[in-house]
Amino acid sequence: MRDLIAMACDGCKRRNYTTSKNKKRQTEKFAIKKFCPSCRSHTLHKEAKV
Ligand SMILES: [Zn+2]
């Protein structure tokens, strides 16, 4: 029951990464700091629909 999600940059809203998460175990939205190529820096990436 793992679903594919996208991680979208909080600055430019680009979806730079995709990952999967277990919806049954992780129901809240999560955010992680990742490198954004268009911002050229590490920004907060939030969960988004693929
Ligand atoms: Zn960005």
Image: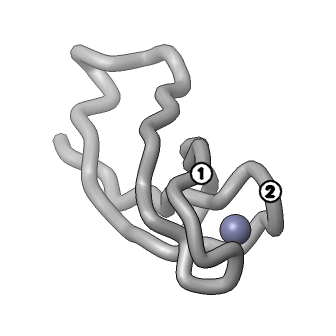
Its colouring scheme is: one colour
Pointer 1: what residue? 43
Rendered location of residue 39, percent (x, y): 69, 74
Pointer 2: what residue? 11
Instruction: Report the amino acid beneath label 1.
Output: Thr
Q: Is the CB of the residue bearing disc 1 within 8 angstroms of ligand 1?
A: yes
Rendered location of residue 3, percent (x, y): 31, 51
Q: Nearer the viewer, residue 37 or 15?
A: 37
Ligand 1 in which quarter:
bottom right
Q: Residues within 10 Å of mark 2 (few under 14, many from 20)?
A: few
Quadrant of the snapshot with the N terminus? top left
What secondary structure is marked by label 2?
loop
**Rounded to the nearest whole Å, what is the CA distance between mark 1 and mark 2?**
7 Å
Q: Nearer the viewer, residue 50 or 32?
A: 32
Q: Residues within 10 Å of mark 1 (few under 14, many from 20)?
A: some
Q: Residue at x 42, y 55 (%)?
A: 34
Q: Nearer the viewer, residue 35 or 32?
A: 35
Q: Among all residues in the image, which is located at the extreme front?
A: 41
